[in-house]
Amino acid sequence: MAEEKGSFDFSVAMSVYQKDQPRHFERALDSVIKQTLPPREIVIVLDGPVGGEVTDIIRDRAEKHRERIAIRTISFKRNRGLGPALKAAVERCRYEWVARMDSDDIARPKRFEIQVNYIMQNPDTDVLGGQIAEFMDEDETTLSYRRTPLTAEGIGNALKRRCPFNHMTVMMRREAVLGAGNYRAWHFNEDYDLWIRMFLNGSRFANVDRVLVKVRIGREMYRRRGGLAYFRSEKRIQSMLFKEGVIGMRGYLANVWIRFLVQIVLPDRLRGIVFRRFARDTRKPGPHAGR
């Protein structure tokens, strides 16, 4: 562990690919750099060719902040997907704790300060996430929140039905991630797959009741949450849970049936209504969320 007394050094893992908007990536990267408690390094995977504008942004920030933050890149010749990209990033990270950040979201200024304070007070934690506020495209007015359970018990129960973390908010103990096999290629569910394996490996989970990241949702979000490819990925997750004894046959059948209805049967408009009604919340998490 590369920490000195009184410090808490950690890495941030990001991945960017060709379809990411450079201006969104720039905003996301700057929100990490300008934290009240910034990371010691940022490892960015270029998942296939990304264009000169993105590489110029990375080069500019690396030069400007080289005295306090090491910004390093890993380049893939072709797009390999988020799972392989994050696997490579975690392997390259130098510090015990690795924070995730997406390439088009905005971290709240005190995100890492909040998480590090929690970890220092709860040193047995292996994965710590938090809440997100969702906004549409360029308008940063919050539309909804995705709330996650806070305790290890609540997260374990939620894991049997749905992904219990907001992936873009997590900080992870690197050793625990590697001990469970690291990220794998799993279409749409790279994170859920990892949490299940870490859960089975005895990792300790928690979420803070604070908005840590503002998440950009496009108008196609609910369309992407449906279709045969998405359903097959979700069904594989449920099969994994059943095979490992996390859920029984009744839970497996119920979970698959619900997903079939929502992801295959419902049209996009109705799927959006279901997600907003049952998977999102209009209540702001925490007494001082986002400060």
Image (cartoon, rainbow, N blue to C red):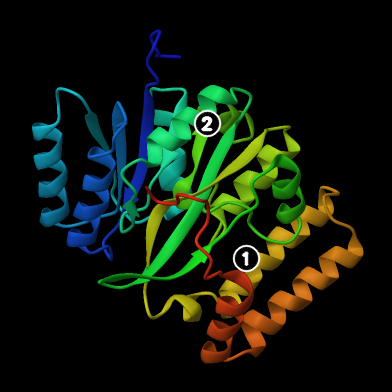
Q: Which numbered disc covers residue 118?
A: 2
Q: Is residue 182 among what the camera can see?
A: no
Q: Residue at x 22, y 64 (%)?
A: 21
Q: Quadrant of residue 61?
A: top left
Q: Return the x and y of residue 233 as percentages of the image width and height.
A: 62, 65
Q: Amino acid at mark 2?
A: Tyr
Q: Check disc 1: other Cα within 10 Å, few if <14, some if 14-19, many if 20+.
A: some
x and y percentages locating residue 46 in the rendered image: 28, 48
Residue behind mark 1: 233
Q: Is residue 60 above or below residue 23?
A: above
Residue 190's place in the image compared with 153, above or below, is below
Gap in Å between the C-alphas at discs 1 and 2? 33 Å
Question: Which residue shows up at 23% across the image and 60% down it?
Answer: 24
Q: Is residue 150 visible?
A: yes
With 120 as the anchor, is 249 left or right in this view?
right
172 displayed left or right of 2: right
What residue do we see at 35% from left, 40% from top? Answer: 110
Q: Please tell me which residue lies in front, 62 or 34.
A: 34
**Relative horizontal placement of residue 202, taking residue 17 as reference (left or right):** right
Q: Is residue 126 above or below residue 80?
A: above
Please state which of the two labelled residues, at mark 1 or mark 2, is closer to the viewer: 2
Q: Nearer the viewer, residue 166 or 174?
A: 166
Mark 1 vs 2: CB contact within 8 A: no
Residue 258: % across, % down: 74, 77
Q: Image check: 247 left or right of 15?
A: right
Local crowd size for mark 2, using a 10 Å CA cut-off: few (<14), some (14–19), many (≥20): some
The disc, 1 or 2, on the residue closer to the chain's N-terminal end is: 2
Q: What's the amino acid at mark 1?
A: Ser
